[in-house]
Image (cartoon, helix red, strand yellow):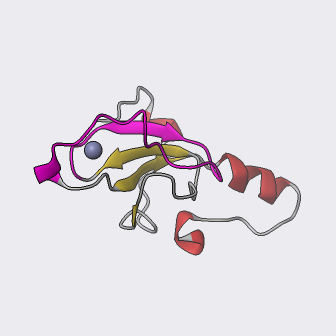
Amino acid sequence: MAIYQDAAYVKRGTGGFDAKYKPGDPTPHSGIYRCAVCGREDVSEAGKPLPSQNHNQHDPAEGPIRWKLLVYSEGDSIRRSRTGLKQGTAHSVI
Ligand SMILES: [Zn+2]
């Protein structure tokens, strides 16, 4: 489970959190991803492959790893808004 200390720096979002990704798929947003099968969490950076070999091995009965976005950083969105570009959201990319 993801843990935070100061609620002033996180907010609830609704768009883009339902999609499931395979290991090695390009990461849509920098942030924390949770395996929908076993619950393990890992961090991945936008544009880089989602974790595969470092993820714990599933029992064959569990099925394959499926990553879901748990928490993402707005770092890119803030940078875009400062430069006058359109602010992105998880919903607009996935
Ligand atoms: Zn898993």
Q: Position of residue 81 (x, y in %)?
A: 79, 59
Residue 54 colored in magenta in the image? yes
Q: Nearer the viewer, residue 6 or 88?
A: 88
Work out whether residue 38 or residue 1 is closer to the camera in this orientation and state it.
38
The residue lying furthest to the left in this view is 61
From this view, report whether residue 78 is shown above or below residue 51: below
Say which of 83 and 38 sits in front: 38
Estimate the x, y position of residue 1 in percent, counting from the top left.
28, 35
86 with respect to 63 (left or right): right
Q: How many marks?
A: 0
Q: Residue at x 63, y 48 (%)?
A: 48
Predominant SS along the magenta part = loop
- The part of the image, by quadrant, that contains residue 45 is top right
| Magenta residues (range) | 37-62
Residue occupying the point 79% across, 50% down: 79
Q: In this view, which residue lies farthest toward the top?
A: 5
Viewed as shown, does residue 47 lie left or right of 27?
right
Ligand 1 resides in the quarter of the picture at top left
Q: Please provide percent x and percent y for residue 36.
A: 26, 53
Along the line of sight, the residue nearer the viewer: 18 or 24: 24
Q: Residue at x 43, y 43 (%)?
A: 52
Pinpoint residue 61: horizontal percent, then vertical percent: 11, 52
Left or right placement of residue 39 versus residue 25 in this view: left
- Specify whether 29 is left or right of 37: right
Q: Which residue in the rendered view is the most extreme toward the front?
A: 60
